Amino acid sequence: MAQTSTSPSRYSHLETLFGPRTRDRIRNCSVLVIGAGGIGCELLKNLVCTGFGNITIVDLDTVDTSNLNRQFLFQKKHVKRPKAIVARETASAFNPDVTIHALHANVMDPQFDQAYFKSFDLVLNALDNLAARRHVNKMCVMTKVPLIESGTAGYNGQVQPIRSGKMECYDCQPKPLPKTFPVCTIRSTPSTAIHCIVWAKDYLFPQLFGPEDENEGADLDEAVKNGESVKEVETLKEEVKRMKEIRAQLDSPEMSKIVFEKLFQEDIKRLLMMEDMWEHRRAPTPLNYDQLASQELNQPENGHQNQQAVPSAGGLKDQQTLTLKNSFDLFCSSLLALGKRIQSDAAHEPLRWDKDDDDALDFVTAASNLRATIFDISQKTRFDVKEMAGNIIPAIATTNSAVSALIVFQAIKILSQSKEQDKTTQKDIEANEGGQPDHLPRIAACRPWYSKTAERMIVAGSIDPPNPHCEVCQVVYSTVHVHPDCTLKEFIKQVLKGKLYDDEDEESITIQEGDRLLYDPDYTDNSIKTFKELNLIDGQVERVLRITDEAEQYVPLMCTISKSAPTTADKILVEDLPDILPHRPAPKPVSKPASDLGDNSDIEQVDAQNGSNGTKKRRTGPAVSGSNKDDDIIVVIDQLDDDHSNPRPTKKIKLDQHQSNHPVSNDLVEIVEIS
């Protein structure tokens, strides 16, 4: 329902800044927020306080104690509860006029199909992994829903608006393999080896051997006084007590069994009780201490066969591939060694993890590999663990806050431009508003700047047009309603004839559904089968067919097979399919993948106090060829003193020639570096 009556005092700032038309769009638009972590919490708060009227938030994770220091919508009473649900409960109190829907689910689940995405005016990403980002990008390109992408890496952050057909999408530029790793969801449902390594290094090691948190009990007592859930607090107290009891037994000969059963059996069984968490992913398999200790292995399905460690060609210890038994033995021995070190110290000085500490590295390697086995994740060698653990970048709350603000700026900008198709002139707008100016040009006051000075912490770069070779946004998308009894041959003749082939070269096309080949010139067996027989229509999941011509003359055609059959007598009903498919562009030249925020190969450090002339420069990477004019440079400020008179060293980032030829537009990528 459109929200037309608003509180003048609450929303007057929107009308003052952007005018009544944009204010109404903000109040009435439907926004999908994906992710309720570091950026997501800040973003939801900003949206609610700004006045966005209809918000849906999706997140698959639960609240962990490690989130509480930077994800301010969560408290200790919320630990183990779904993030999306808790975020809705907390943020709703900021503005009762806002409607927030929360879903504890994976945005990649089949329920979030094209019809679901089409129900929103905007999609705002607050994700922390590449696979989900690429999936959401593809869904927004297919449905033509504006997307605002975002991300942070330590003190760096960026925001990228994406509008299908108007600017490059997330997949237009190749993504380098990440050199740093997210740590937000590692304790709930690890899916990669780095999640297990961070769990062992940043959580398990400090709990057993690091400095104790003396205020833990006091904080829980205060939580009860403040009206928080008594039952949840009591559960947390029991867990704190249990870990303290375990830590007090560091000198016990049974220490390894006590810790092992707590971490790899009791905790895993507790996770298995959350049945909804494992509906769309493989459930973990607890390990048994006694079986491993006696070598009578009842190996889980995801485990390796019991065999000796396999050394690399060089036979180096650090590069050995450990079996489950090897990891178990290493875990027990390193645990006892670290416990003895603390007990032998007269002051019982806590330990700090160091990748060069052999006992500490052994412990993290063994613990992470045991956890990886439980969650069906590939294990890593000691060498791999040492390398990966050293690349972890902490999450910075200030960066999350700055990036979430920039997301809202871009959202308002898109909404202010979203009704261009109305063909309403500026004079018409002013006439309808009693002669008042439209205010929309004033949105520039909220736009981050492109700057060459040392007095800006936020800079903007121009957005490139879509990459003509992109396999996501430069293909043709169409939705097709097909009767279950329609054959693949009928589909080919009615939908594809005259577009991808003529009568004389009918068999020159290839049809795939995911990794499954349905049809090609050498495989025509499926042509007489119906869509029902091919399991392409089940009423539950949308299937997407990728159709290409063998000569690669035309761009690929992506046909989404609707879950619903045609409502007419026709067997096939096609939507949004052009009469003629575009031709493929000329082959692209081989180019180096774009670097990410963590790549310093083209960064120079300069002394900002001396300005741009006569400065000392120290190149941190290989030399950059080509022009080095200031026109091709974006300046990113590390930090300013309070009086702005003594800026600290800045970074000059050299833009490539393609970027520097584009003037700064109203659709921007923001990069912010905070110290």
Image (cartoon, helix red, strand yellow):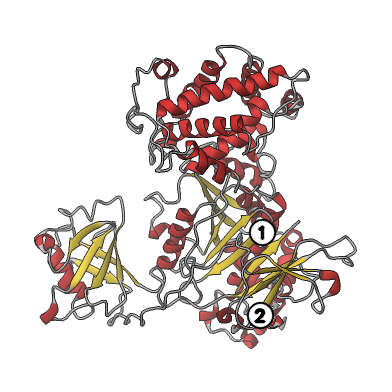
SS type, badge 1:
strand
Residue type at mark 2 is Asp
**Image coords of residue 364 (percent x, y):** 56, 33
Task: Identify whether 316 is placed above or below 523.
Answer: above
Instruction: Residue at the far top: name it.
Output: 253
Alpha carbons under labels 1 and 2: distance apart: 20 Å
Residue at horizontal 66 percent and vertical 52 percent from the top: 42
Q: Is residue 103 left or right of residue 579?
A: right
Residue at horizontal 62 percent and vertical 30 percent from the top: 205
**Image coords of residue 451 (percent x, y):** 74, 75
Q: Is residue 311 left or right of residue 674?
A: left
Residue at horizontal 88 percent and vertical 60 percent from the top: 642
**Image coords of residue 449 (percent x, y):** 71, 73
**Image coords of residue 487 (percent x, y):** 13, 62
- Residue where numbered disc 2 is placed: 632
- Residue where numbered disc 1 is placed: 156
* Circles 1 and 2 in contact, beta carbons < 8 Å: no
Q: How many marks?
A: 2
Q: Between residues 151 and 180, which one lies in front from this camera angle?
A: 180
Residue type at mark 1 is Asn
